[in-house]
Amino acid sequence: QVQLVESGGGLVQAGGSLRLSCAASGRTFSSYAMGWFRQVPGKEREFVAAISWSGGRTVYADSVKGRFTISRDNAKNTVYLQMNSLKPEDTAGYYCAADSFGSPTARAIQYDYWGQGTQVTVSS
């Protein structure tokens, strides 16, 4: 069992930055691939970024490439999402997820555990 708790969301102006954190419980965190997704009410959950268990491989959605960076610290059981050059269209609830397979994927169905989310609002 893995429990995930996101933090770091908030209100920021367009062009600004935020860093999201996702703290995981459980000894096997380092074996999980981790992903970030986002969702706006009334819309489907959207893939943002994912990272392999070792941190050696990352995958990004085209909409955030060059602006967002996913990273992890297995010693701290934490995964991060650094978000720069934020745009109003980045406004959403952001969720982290853990995939026991260990390989980064954009497919939400492959993730076994999900956090409760943290809200990011970007004003224009």
Image (tube, grey):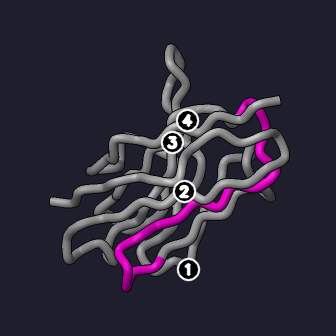
Indicate which disc, 4 or 2, sits on the residue closer to the N terminus.
Answer: 2
SS label for mark 3: strand
Name the amino acid, label 3. Answer: Tyr
Of circles 4 and 2, the one toward us is 2
* Residue visible at 31% across and 64% down in the picture: 24
Disc 4 target residue = 46
Start-end of magenta stretch = 73-89
Disc 2 target residue = 20
Name the amino acid, label 1. Answer: Gly
> Callout 1 environment at 10 Å: few (<14), some (14 to 19), or many (20+)?
few
Query: How far apart are the alpha carbons under marks 3 and 2?
Result: 9 Å
Indicate which disc, 1 or 4, sits on the residue closer to the N terminus.
Answer: 4
Task: Give the quarter of the figure containing the N terminus.
Answer: bottom left
Residue 112 locus on image (x, y percent): 27, 50
Indicate which disc, 2 or 1, sits on the residue closer to the N terminus.
Answer: 2
Disc 1 target residue = 56
SS label for mark 4: strand
Indicate which disc, 4 or 3, sits on the residue closer to the N terminus.
Answer: 4
